[in-house]
Image (tube, rainbow, N blue to C red):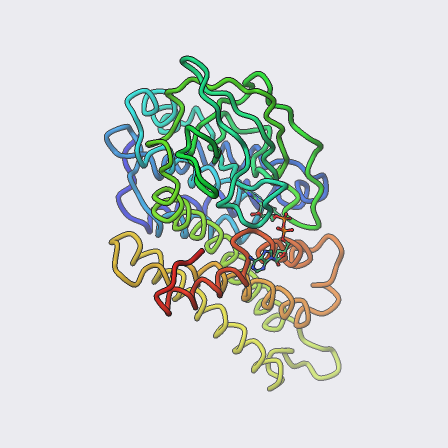
Amino acid sequence: MKAIERVEDVRGRAREIATSVVAEDSAKEDREGAWPERSLRALTDAGLTALHVPRELGGHGLGLEALVVACEEIGRESPSAAICFGMHCVATAVIAAKATDHQRERYLEPIAAGEHLTTLALSEPGTGSHFWIPETQIEPDGDEHILRGTKSFITNGGHADSYVLSVAGVEAGGGEGTFSCVVVDAGSEGMEWQEEWVGFGMRGNSSRAVELRDVRLPRENLLGEPGDQLWYTFEVVTPFFLSAMAGTYLGVAVEAVEVARDHVGGRRHSHTGELIGSDPVVGLRLGEMWLEMERTRQLIYKGARAGDVQEGDALLAILGAKAAAADSSVLLANEAMTLSGGRGYAEQGKLTRLLRDARASHVMAPTTDQLKQWIGRALLGLPLV
Ligand SMILES: Cc1cc2nc3c(=O)[nH]c(=O)nc-3n(C[C@H](O)[C@H](O)[C@H](O)COP(=O)(O)OP(=O)(O)OC[C@H]3O[C@@H](n4cnc5c(N)ncnc54)[C@H](O)[C@@H]3O)c2cc1C
């Protein structure tokens, strides 16, 4: 497949799939808690799951801005599908960051060919929202490693072909909070999936837990050097993970403004014959919604573009991007529901789903409070964690 050159081409391809397959399936997936299989297939067939594979391996070699754009467009129709897509992209970027020849051949080339889906598994039940502190242990054993522990809330859980995990232990460099990343193939003996994910929102993303009972892993599946934890966390996971989530929840904010605009710009009361939107209070509230969305959009794209060219002030905007997207998506889905009246409040309506999905943004680590704290610490020149 020909490499995608421009970010706007990513938007075009993502929009086309979002308004067709993703939009067609999103209500049913939410109702049934079903993983968005058809949407992921369509995104793969359009080459979008190869966004972060280097060009020399058949991918598009794109960065954070492309990730935000794709997640925004998919997120407008299904935040669940956007996060499933986004976590594949983050894990791809982690594998690509320091890939060996073996890892290129086994993971990155199949991803470029649309034959492999991966995902990120950092969170654990013990350390919760402190995703940078894994307790899953890695232990050397001859030519292999042995993994023991539990990973929780794995988006694409049970559906991906491989899982990028953070692990702690001797091989990870030792010491509290140190870890390395490994890639584990689906179906490895000793991986025991826990119950299905049933969320308040984000119901289509199969965020399941897996227990790792003495899972044997070839040594060549260690990513980077033992104890590369700070490098992976801050150079790869943080910018890609935050951009995927910021794009997804920006999609909710954008769509909330559109839904509200459609309603107040299309509905007339019979007794006046006037559009609801011509009421000064309604017009003002719609204007405020747009301002909130646009401020958030500008911050998110500033962070992604600055990150792509490694500008010095990228970090603050990237941290702020997910926090702002979380605040805006919940606020605007809620506001849109007010302006859309009884129709917007319908149980199976799009806004109901968007509002429930948006609510996950404050829970998904780094949480909004953590991000704001980190911005403050960065401004003071203190270490983030
Ligand atoms: C839909 C969904 C998808 C997810 N997908 C993935 C995934 O693909 N990969 C992955 O690795 N993880 C994923 N997660 C996990 C997620 O990122 C969080 O790590 C996890 O939900 C938080 O763990 P916990 O429930 O134990 O929260 P707890 O650790 O119990 O925290 C509860 C709350 O306490 C507050 N809090 C805790 N610590 C602090 C602090 N230091 N500062 C400020 N406030 C704090 C926050 O409000 C937090 O929400 C997903 C979660 C959800 C809901």
* Quadrant location, the C terminus: bottom left
Above/below status of 22 relative to 222: below
For the residue pair 100 and 354, the one nearer the viewer reads as 100
Spot occupied by residue 245 in the image (x, y as percentages of width and height): 49, 52
Q: Residue at x 45, y 45 (%)?
A: 16
For the residue pair 228 and 367, the one nearer the viewer reads as 228
Above/below status of 191 relative to 370: above
* Quadrant location, the N terminus: top left
Spot occupied by residue 130 in the image (x, y as percentages of width and height): 54, 49
Which residue of the protein is positioned furthest toward the top in this rendering?
142
Spot occupied by residue 383 in the image (x, y as percentages of width and height): 39, 59
Above/below status of 157 relative to 377: above
Residue 384 lies left or right of residue 191; in this view the side is left
When asked about the image quadrant of residue 109, the answer is top left
For the residue pair 30 and 234, the one nearer the viewer reads as 234
When asked about the image quadrant of residue 261, the answer is bottom right
Which residue of the protein is positioned furthest toward the bottom in this rendering?
280
Q: How many marks?
A: 0
Above/below status of 20 relative to 212: below
Spot occupied by residue 156 in the image (x, y as percentages of width and height): 56, 35
Q: Residue at x 70, y 55 (%)?
A: 349
